[in-house]
Amino acid sequence: MEPGRGRHSIVNRRNDQTPAISARQLAELVDRHGPALVLYARQICTEPEDVVQEAFLEFMEQPTCPESVPAWLFRVVRNRALDRVRSSKRRENRHREVAGDEQWLTVNIDSRLDAATVAESLKELDANFREIITARIWGELSFEQIGELVGTSSSTAHRRYVEGLELLREKLGATCPKNQ
Amino acid sequence: MSEESINDESTNPELLELEASLRGLSAASNLNRAELLFEAGRRSADGRSGSRSGIWQVVSTVLALMLVGQSFLFWSSDDRQIADSDSARNHSVTPEAETPNSKTDSHNGQATDFKDVAERNNLPTQRSEFLELRRVALARGVDAAFSSRVDDSKHSAPGQSTQQELLRELLGS
């Protein structure tokens, strides 16, 4: 069973043993991957914080640490987010519902892009492009991991990534004043 | 396709520049870190206490079942003992009905029964003879009792007169 599907990991966890990670390690993981995971979940469902929190809690209950923690977390987040969409029967409205008012990105000091503009341009992209761009840039996953995540080959993931970036560049070139 | 070749394919300088610019942005998150860590700690504590409570539940269930089983065995054995004692008592009270070849006395079947019972219950036979004599005397009179004693022991008893006196004294006549 895939991680994040059903209650497999919770039922089979070893209650008599300590979790695979300590509270400090969990806090570090939350600080490091939490925002990217929330942004990624935001591309799929409307309750990204809840989904990410559930993913971290499920990770904590794992008896052994996954080989790649970020890839595992992204996979759990994706599965749980899709489950939420399915359960609420809002998959058809997925593209419209992700366009909420929440802040997607924040500006770093050295950034030459406007966060709000990038977010608006991202929202206009297809969900498949958004998902891969988010996982690649802010999730820092490899294309192999992205391919496994979205159920495609690494080459297909790369092709969609490049295609999505080009679309994003076109949108940013037309709207972003910093690039003009 | 390896990661190197992918990077080589995406060497479009404009895309690389956009990629670097996008990396300069940070993902915003409203994730409640404190709540998440608190929930993680709570679940961890629940998991540990849950395993302990599970053990206690199993132990208490086994003990309860053992208690019920012991109680059932105790009461069932007690009933059996009572039934056994009752049947034994009935058997000892009415043995003659089950023994067709019981001894018969020349004078009175009751007296023979009494003797049998006395012998079976280790009662003093001397006393039972005395009671037998008393019963005959009450039923048929003192003379009959005396005569029966004579018939029983044809060749006389030396203390016969004494027995007769005692018998009269006993019967108050």
Image: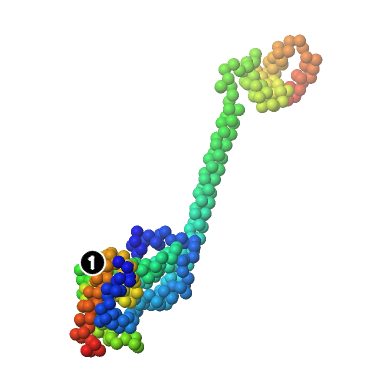
Please state the horizontal and vertical placement of residue A71, each as a whole percent of the image: 36, 68
Please state the horizontal and vertical placement of residue A14, each as a whole percent of the image: 46, 60
User: Between A52 and A68, which is closer to the camera in this rendering?
Assistant: A68
Can you identify the residue that label 1 sits on? A89
| In this view, B29 is above or below A148 | below
Q: Quadrant of the C terminus of chain B?
A: top right
Q: Is residue A80 visible?
A: no
| In this view, A141 is above or below A10 | below
Q: Is residue B81 visible?
A: yes
In the figure, residue A57 lies in which quadrant? bottom left
Residue under the point 56% across and 31% down = B87
The answer to whether B48 appears left or right of B104 in the picture is left
Dot 1 falls on a residue whose secondary structure is loop
Residue under the point 33% across and 71% down = B4
Q: Quadrant of the N terminus of chain B?
A: bottom left
The answer to whether A95 appears left or right of A137 in the picture is left
